Image (tube, rainbow, N blue to C red):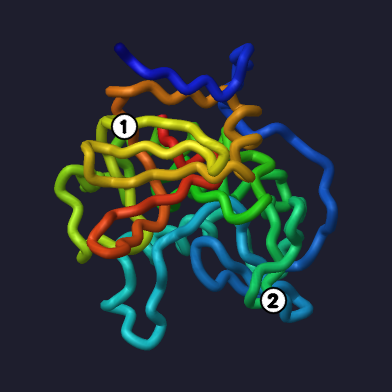
């Protein structure tokens, strides 16, 4: 008999958007420098980190050691914004990161969402940090479409197999597997992928998943993203946001 964990009594439809909804600007600033594909410097010297994406890293000391597509991501921004341009910022729940950088959705002077542009072009991965998830469904759809086209960083995309994980795989990963065990208790929801990867949604995080109609079925195949850790040889992954369950 299959086990079903229902996280929402009445499943709510979650719309997939072709474009992120237009919003009012919180602040308009002047661009001083494009640092890389997801970070810019403002005229006042303030660093702004784009919310919702991560682009490949540029190694400015040894450029040949930069991540693949790192300069493509920077050059994409250079085609749409120039030094001295106005940029429009939209904030989310958290305005600064631990490095003191301003966190914002950044728009060109014509109103183009630059993080969405990177995702649509295949030069960024989508991730949700903390509570900043205003456009996560739209961003997730854009990433999915780029993956389906094998665009940019997705051209050689091969998620790890849950059944074949080793401790060398630790760190942020994409992992595919089938739910082999599934239970819910006061601590949250716990399940395994291919009897190998222990996955947990802590009780305090369940509301986010309920609000987005997430259902988990025994024997269901999933593609997950997140920070893979190992403890006493056991592979573990925590899910804190429904964006980590990829379509």
Return the mark for residue 181: 1
Q: Is residue 206 visible?
A: yes
Return the x and y of residue 31 as percentages of the image width and height. 70, 68
For marks 2 and 1 on the same chain, the one whose residue lies earlier in the sequence: 2
Q: Which of 123/219 is in front?
A: 219
Return the mark for residue 102: none
Instruction: Provide the residue designation for mark 2.
Output: 100
Q: Tell me the quarter of the image containing the N terminus.
A: top left
The span from disc 2 to disc 1 (Cα, nearest Å) is: 41 Å
Residue 241 located left or right of residue 232: right
Q: Residue at x 84, y 57 (%)?
A: 27
Return the x and y of residue 22 as percentages of the image width and height. 74, 35
Above or below, 58 relative to 175: below
Q: Is residue 119 visible?
A: no
Above or below, 167 relative to 130: below
Residue 2 appears in which quarter of the rendering?
top left
Mark 1 secondary-structure assignment: strand
Above or below, 169 relative to 221: below
Q: Residue at x 72, y 63 (%)?
A: 85
Above or below, 202 relative to 215: below
Residue 102 located left or right of residue 245: right
Q: Residue furthest bottom?
A: 61
Q: Residue at x 62, y 74 (%)?
A: 33
């Amino acid at each position: 008999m299959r086990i079903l964990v229902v996280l929402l009594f009445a499943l709510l439809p979650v719309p997939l958007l072709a474009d992120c909804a237009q919003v009012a600007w919180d602040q308009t600033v002047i661009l001083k420098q494009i640092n890389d594909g997801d970070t810019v410097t403002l005229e006042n010297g303030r660093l702004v980190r784009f919310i919702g994406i991560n682009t490949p890293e540029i190694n400015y000391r040894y450029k040949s050691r930069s991540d693949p597509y790192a300069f493509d991501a920077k050059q994409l921004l250079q085609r749409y914004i120039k030094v001295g341009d106005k940029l429009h910022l939209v904030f989310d729940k958290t305005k600064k990161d631990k490095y003191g950088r301003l966190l914002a959705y950044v728009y060109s002077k014509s109103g183009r969402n630059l993080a969405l542009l990177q995702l649509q072009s295949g030069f960024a991965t989508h991730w949700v940090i903390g509570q900043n998830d205003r456009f996560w469904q739209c961003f997730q759809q854009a990433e999915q479409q780029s993956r389906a086209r094998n665009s940019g960083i997705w051209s050689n995309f091969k998620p790890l197999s849950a059944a074949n994980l080793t401790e060398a795989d630790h760190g942020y990963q994409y992992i595919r597997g089938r739910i082999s065990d599934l239970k819910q208790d006061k601590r949250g929801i716990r399940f395994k992928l291919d009897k190998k990867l222990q996955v947990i949604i802590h009780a305090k995080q369940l509301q986010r998943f309920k609000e987005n109609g997430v259902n988990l079925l025994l024997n269901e195949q999933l593609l997950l993203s997140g920070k893979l850790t190992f403890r006493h040889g056991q592979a573990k992954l925590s899910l804190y946001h429904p964006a980590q369950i990829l379509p």
